[in-house]
Image (cartoon, rainbow, N blue to C red):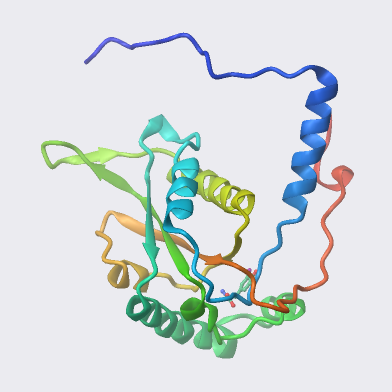
């Protein structure tokens, strides 16, 4: 085994306290503007932006730095059509018999249903896959750790990076997502985590009225 290698931390930045407070407030305000969108425009988005945002996601902290994720970026209309068809089939089952009534009641305010036209209209669909294990150089299995946590953090950072770049997203979870491996040509060690729809909101896009919990409701300071 190689001996551990360390270098000085030079990238960390400290801010004076007043600036720290301002930065925290302004980042919160900017993130609070983010809304999940379900009506997308077909306006093209530069691929370079998607690539940079995926690089940002890939800086996420993760188990033993195995980086157990893959981002399958789909812009090809034929593949998008296949994804829409497969997702709508699962969603039809979900809305018509699979989902318990409580769940359907909870979704009412979002106005969702089995029709997912955005899966063909939005310029990019990013299939996010978690890698249950990796492949070592000799072809044997390489263990990954805290895979769901790692991929969840990376996904949050991807959504944040895309928002920061001026794009809208929809975290779409057609359930089950098994079809994504076949359509996006991903190997058996990868499991679909979610499908992120990316683009500009359509003209006149509307969003449901929702509220966020207050700090007191979500945090305790002990
Ligand atoms: N996957 C379905 C249902 C759905 C479930 C939850 I939880 C949501 O927050 C939104 C939708 C769909 O995409 O319609």
Quarter of the rendering occupied by the C terminus: top right
Tell whether 182 sits left or right of 164.
Answer: left
Q: Is residue 170 visible?
A: yes
Q: For the view shown, which residue lies furthest in the left direction?
A: 138
Number of marks in the rendered image: 0
Residue 104, image quadrant: bottom right
Tell whether 64 sits left or right of 12.
Answer: left
Q: Position of residue 43 (x, y in %)?
A: 53, 72
**What's the residue at 39%, 82% (across, down)?**
81
Viewer-nearest residue: 28 or 128: 28
Viewer-nearest residue: 190 or 160: 160
78 versus 170 height, above or below: below
Residue 166, image quadrant: bottom right
Viewer-nearest residue: 28 or 112: 28
Viewer-nearest residue: 50 or 155: 50
Quarter of the rendering occupied by the N terminus: top left
**What's the residue at 50%, 87% (across, down)?**
93
Q: Quadrant of ligand 1?
A: bottom right
42 versus 28 height, above or below: below
Q: Position of residue 39 (x, y in %)?
A: 63, 77
Q: For the view shown, which residue lies furthest in the bottom direction?
A: 96
Q: Position of residue 193 (x, y in %)?
A: 45, 59
Q: Is residue 222 visible?
A: no
**What's the residue at 59%, 51% (across, down)?**
165
Residue 7, image quadrant: top left
**What's the residue at 63%, 53% (across, down)?**
163
Tell whether 217 sits left or right of 89.
Answer: right
């Amino acid at each position: 085994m190689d001996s551990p290698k360390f270098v000085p931390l030079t990238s960390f930045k400290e801010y004076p306290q007043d600036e720290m407070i301002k930065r925290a407030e302004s980042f919160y305000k900017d993130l609070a503007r983010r809304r999940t969108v379900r009506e997308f425009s077909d306006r093209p988005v530069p691929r370079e932006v998607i690539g940079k945002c995926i690089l940002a996601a890939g800086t996420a902290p993760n188990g033993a730095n195995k980086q157990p994720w893959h981002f399958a970026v789909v812009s090809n209309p034929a593949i998008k059509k296949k994804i829409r068809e497969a997702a709508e089939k699962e969603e039809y089952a979900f809305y018509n018999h699979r989902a318990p009534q409580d769940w359907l009641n909870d979704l009412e305010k979002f106005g969702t249903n089995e029709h997912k036209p955005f899966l063909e209209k939005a310029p990019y669909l990013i299939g996010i896959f978690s890698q249950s294990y990796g492949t070592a150089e000799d072809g044997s299995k390489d263990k990954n750790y805290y895979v769901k946590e790692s991929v969840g953090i990376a996904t949050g950072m991807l959504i944040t990076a895309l928002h920061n770049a001026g794009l809208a997203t929809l975290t779409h979870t057609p359930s089950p997502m098994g079809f994504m491996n076949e359509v996006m040509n991903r190997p058996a060690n990868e499991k679909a985590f979610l499908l992120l729809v990316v683009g500009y909101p359509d003209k006149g896009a509307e969003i449901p009225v929702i509220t966020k919990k207050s700090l007191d409701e979500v945090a305790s300071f002990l």
